[in-house]
């Protein structure tokens, strides 16, 4: 069965094409280009042509940082103490909420066990409908470190190595480390470094040996530099960047996933939060945007992630991240690339994030050109994953 989607315009992950068509066969895109040049279908093959479902098509969006087991309740400390059974149910529901919002691939950067790994497997086997899931299992942190409430605590290079191996054994598709303190929870504050160079190097080596990417949570510049020197693939949050750190990150080709939505959502709901969290958030917010602007100008790769699941950060508000990126100097085209082709490179799935022959038929349809107004992404008219309509 072959389906031809005709649209007024499409964004292929890098550029816009007007009066376009996409040919989908099974779970794959077999052709994309100008509407007048659609290749003929062999006469024995069934083919249908669909106008839309919206006027504009783009690759399925990619969220490089979320926590499916969390709903974003006001009190993070209480929510993380939930049962594994409830966490699993939430993960399924949140994965579907993200999918309806156009997110066809998401990376879960830490749960209190293998629940999201199992969800990803169940979706891949066709047992459940949902987006593509790349799960880290448990994030790896120090004794008393940020994320200790849900993370795998490991101190010293040997224990860190073992902690990585445990996640690999459980079926993790990415490794998540916590290089510095953070905003939510009772662990160390954001600017404080957690892991030493030796511990970080052990984690990176083990992850890469298993063929996995490794990404790290880091706010403070010192922690980011330790991670970059050790060969980390990407840095999450990156709130307290300085020129020296930006230079190193650029040299090492480390990608940034700034998660602007979580900072924005926490400040939006400051009155409902613990004053310590509000103070920690305010202290990093301005510097965050300034650092990103400089990093972007320096040519550092930036990809979309929202940290959905953290307090007040909803799984269906992915598109707001793109708007926030444009406030930090990215053009709308660059923001769209950060959510598609750029994010695909960060998560290591090159068949996602692009519309072209051989790519996965993960597609989002919207009513108007998102390059004119990114807000149209908030209400997709159609979402396809693996060639099938999900919305
Ligand atoms: Zn997170």
Image: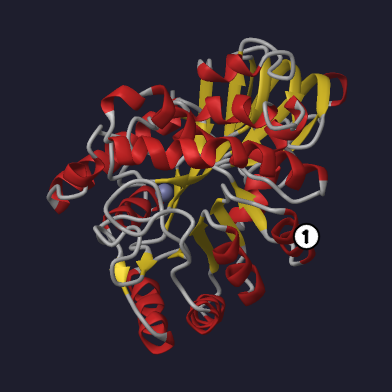
Number of dots carrying numbers:
1
Residue 167, quarter of picture: bottom left
User: Which residue bears the numbered disc 1?
Assistant: 247
The residue sitting at 77% across, 28% down in the picture is 331
Q: Is residue 381 above or below residue 272?
A: above
The residue sitting at 15% across, 44% down in the picture is 86
- Residue 333 horizontal/vertical position (percent): 76, 29
Q: Is residue 196 above or below residue 148?
A: below
Is residue 83 something that shows in the picture?
yes
The residue sitting at 50% across, 83% down in the picture is 202
Quadrant in which the C terminus appears: top left
- Residue 24 horizontal/vertical position (percent): 64, 34
Quadrant in which the N terminus appears: top right
Residue 230, quarter of picture: bottom right
Depth check, front residue: 37 or 316: 316
- Residue 22 horizontal/vertical position (percent): 71, 28
Depth check, front residue: 230 or 62: 230
Is residue 316 something that shows in the picture?
no
Provide the secondary structure element on which disc 1 rests: helix
Q: Is residue 273 left or right of residue 99?
A: left
Depth check, front residue: 312 or 351: 312
Depth check, front residue: 292 or 318: 292
Circle 1 residues within 10 Å: few <14, some 14–19, many ≥20 = some
């Amino acid at each position: 069965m072959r389906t031809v989607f005709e649209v007024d315009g499409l964004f292929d992950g890098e550029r816009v094409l007007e009066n376009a068509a996409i040919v989908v066969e099974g779970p794959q895109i077999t052709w994309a280009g100008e509407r007048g040049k659609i290749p003929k279908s062999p006469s024995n093959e069934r083919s249908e042509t669909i106008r839309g479902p919206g006027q504009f098509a783009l690759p399925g969006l990619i969220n490089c940082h979320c926590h499916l087991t969390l709903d974003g309740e006001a009190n993070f400390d209480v929510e993380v103490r939930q049962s594994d059974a409830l966490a699993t149910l939430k993960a399924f529901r949140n994965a579907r909420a993200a999918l309806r919002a156009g997110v066809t691939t998401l990376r879960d950067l830490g749960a209190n066990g293998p629940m999201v790994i199992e969800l990803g497997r169940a979706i891949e086997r066709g047992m459940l409908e949902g987006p593509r899931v790349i799960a880290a299992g448990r994030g790896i942190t120090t004794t008393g470190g940020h994320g200790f409430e849900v993370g795998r605590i490991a101190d010293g290079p040997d224990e860190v190595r073992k902690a990585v191996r445990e996640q690999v054994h459980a079926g993790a598709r990415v490794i998540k480390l916590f290089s510095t303190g953070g905003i939510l929870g009772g662990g160390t504050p954001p600017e404080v470094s957690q892991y030493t160079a030796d511990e970080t190097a052990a984690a990176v080596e083990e992850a890469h040996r298993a063929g996995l990417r490794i990404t790290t949570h880091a706010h403070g510049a010192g922690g980011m530099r330790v991670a970059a020197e050790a060969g980390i693939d990407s840095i999450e949050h990156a709130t307290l960047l300085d020129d020296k750190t930006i230079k190193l990150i650029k040299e090492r080709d480390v990608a940034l996933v700034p998660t602007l939505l979580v900072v924005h959502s926490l400040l939006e709901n400051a009155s409902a939060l613990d004053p310590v969290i509000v103070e920690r958030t305010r202290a990093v917010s301005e510097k965050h945007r300034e650092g990103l602007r400089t990093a972007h100008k320096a040519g550092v790769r930036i990809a979309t992630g929202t940290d959905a699941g953290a307090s007040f950060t909803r799984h269906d508000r992915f598109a707001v991240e793109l708007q926030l990126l444009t406030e930090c100097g990215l053009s709308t085209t660059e923001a769209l690339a950060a959510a598609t082709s750029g994010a695909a490179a960060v998560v290591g799935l090159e068949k996602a994030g692009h519309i072209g022959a051989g790519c996965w038929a993960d597609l989002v349809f919207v009513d108007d050109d998102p390059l004119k107004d990114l807000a149209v992404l908030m209400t997709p008219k159609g979402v396809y994953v693996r060639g099938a309509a999900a919305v």
